[in-house]
Amino acid sequence: MSELWELTAHAAQEGLRAKEFSAIELTESVLSRVDAVESSVNAYITRTDTIAREQAMEADARFAAGTATPLTGIPFAIKDLIVTKGIRTTAGSRMLGDFIPPYDSHVFEQLKRAGAVLVGKANMDEFAMGSSTEHSAFGPTHNPWDTERVPGGSSGGSAAAVAAGECLAALGSDTGGSIRQPASLCGVVGLDPTYGRVSRFGIIAFGSSLDQVGPIGRDVQDVATILDGISSHDPRDSTSDPAPRPDMRHYLGRDIAGKRIGVPREYFVEGMESGVRARIEEALTRLESLGCEIDTELSLPMTEHALAVYYLIAPSEASSNLARYDGVKYGLSERGGSGMWENMEQTREQGFGDEVKRRIMLGVYALSAGYYDQFYLKAQKVRTLITQEFQEAFTRYDALVTPTTPGIAFPCGAKLDDPYAMYLNDVYTLPSAVAGLPALSLPCGRSEEMPVGLQIIGDVGGEGTILQIGHAFEQSFGQANRLAPL
Amino acid sequence: MYDFHMEISREQVLHIGRLARLGLQPAEIDRLTSQLSDILGHFEALGAVDTADVEPTAHPLPLQNIMRTDSVASSLTREEALSNAPEVEDGLIRVRAVLE
């Protein structure tokens, strides 16, 4: 009756260890699910069926030899800005449409070492710029709960694949909400780790002071397990925090009575859908019944500036990072013009989509002579104030709880012609990103039959606490591993 | 306090587009002029935030001078490093003429 692709990663692990089924059977189940639904979801840019089967056979050998890890044999989707040696990596862009990386990212090395199985490279907004996965050069991903709606973005392919059963777990990346917002819109669990916790080595750069890779899964336990698997210190990323990482699964199942939770009132303002508000209020009641102390009087007045700060800093960093795409060393190279400069312009005109060009323009403007102080420097200073405000709050609270997004998944195309309306989707996920804080999104019910996400923000290095609270909520709520009705 | 001018002119868009070497077409320049003005207009409140004596944040972690041992390690071979180059000659990347 129940299919193997419906399992959580930890349930699949139990089955694999108990020899109830093999890793190759699990992988074949997932691959047949991909065959069945991919034409309506489009979660993948590149499928890696052959590699998946080889890795599944290796995983079975590890179970036989007793060398399996908690991720051995688990079929993964990974976002297509995570560099994979010998496997095309596009970042959702025409610019990298034929790019075959000669090396592996740190996180993919970790997954391979753990014995995970790669199902494919997940679709995304081009260079991670977008909130709907409609800005992909490889066509949009559709939300598996309603394929007329967007899955969120930019890690929309990763979140949709997890929700649709096209993998058991996934990696995404979060710069201003790109893991949490699609996790929320697709009804799955996503974690943006503390900046510096997961190595950025081999992650195609967007906003270097903000980018962070993180897990997407069907429940909190899976997300905790994946974080443990990918977050080791990496000397190849100078922003990788050398501090030891505690075992996240150790936090799960612990009582949360007495946890102090702040609910910043700035996150409950106009523009929030009534169905979202209702689910969040119910979630707060549930957390209170679990013994948490809920304070709804908290005010974080700098919150309103996070969007402007983010949309000046991230595009500025992007305009610098994306200067490398010049058609000379790798990537698309238009060669029809009369010389180097003309070819460079043609390459960038052809290779970048509209949203990427818009962000580069915004960034170059914010950094340009005469505007640097007014825009970029000002944004960096207000970034300090936002961070200080969070630091002050975390002297009094263990975690902050907010909605992940102001609304449920919106219809495809609804916000494509209004860039600012698209940016507003990230209004609740931007502040913690700007401050480098960890934040979890997990399902807390539905509105109009579509998933609603609860966001739990932690202090620096506070992943354990927010996973503990999220896990207790999930156990109480009893709706973990809700696959999309596809 | 800075004077926040949020309107961006067509000439400015043209200038930035040249700096960014995006090969923008006339229709794109018109569209970007109105879109960027709209986006920047929403950022106006930022100008009113008091940031006197506030240090800018370039980076959210208080990490400084992360060092590693200067030791020999394996790296990409020449062949691997050139494997994605659009044009290669004698083990080197071939570029178009810089001077016309």
Image: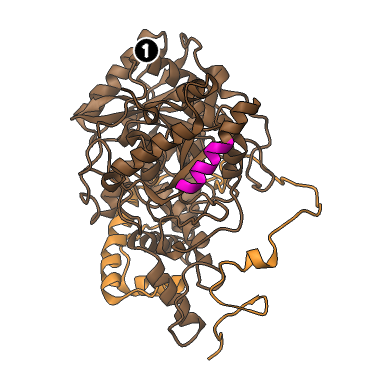
Q: Quadrant of residue A151?
A: top left
Residue A58 at what x, y percent from top left? Answer: 58, 37
Left/right placement of residue B92 relative to residue A158 reads right
Judge by depth and name the residue closer to the eye, A266 or A327.
A327
Left/right placement of residue B73 relative to residue A98 reads right
Q: Amino acid at mark 1?
A: Ser
* Vertical comparison of B23 with B41: above or below: below
| Chain in orange in the render | B
Residue A486 at what x, y percent from top left? Answer: 25, 35
Q: Colour of chain A?
A: brown
Residue B93 at what x, y percent from top left? Answer: 61, 76
* Vertical comparison of A368 with A135: above or below: below
Q: Is residue B42 visible?
A: yes
Say if the magenta span includes residue A97. Answer: no
- Residue at the disc numbered 1: A476
Q: Residue at x 71, y 45 (%)?
A: B66
The region drawn magenta spans A49-58
* Vertical comparison of A426 with A401: above or below: below
Judge by depth and name the residue closer to the eye, A265 or A465.
A465
Q: Residue at x 60, y 58 (%)?
A: A102
Question: On what subunit does the disc labeled 1 rest?
Answer: A
Q: Residue at x 66, y 38 (%)?
A: A233
Judge by depth and name the residue closer to the eye, A313 or A342.
A342
Left/right placement of residue A299 relative to residue B59 reads left
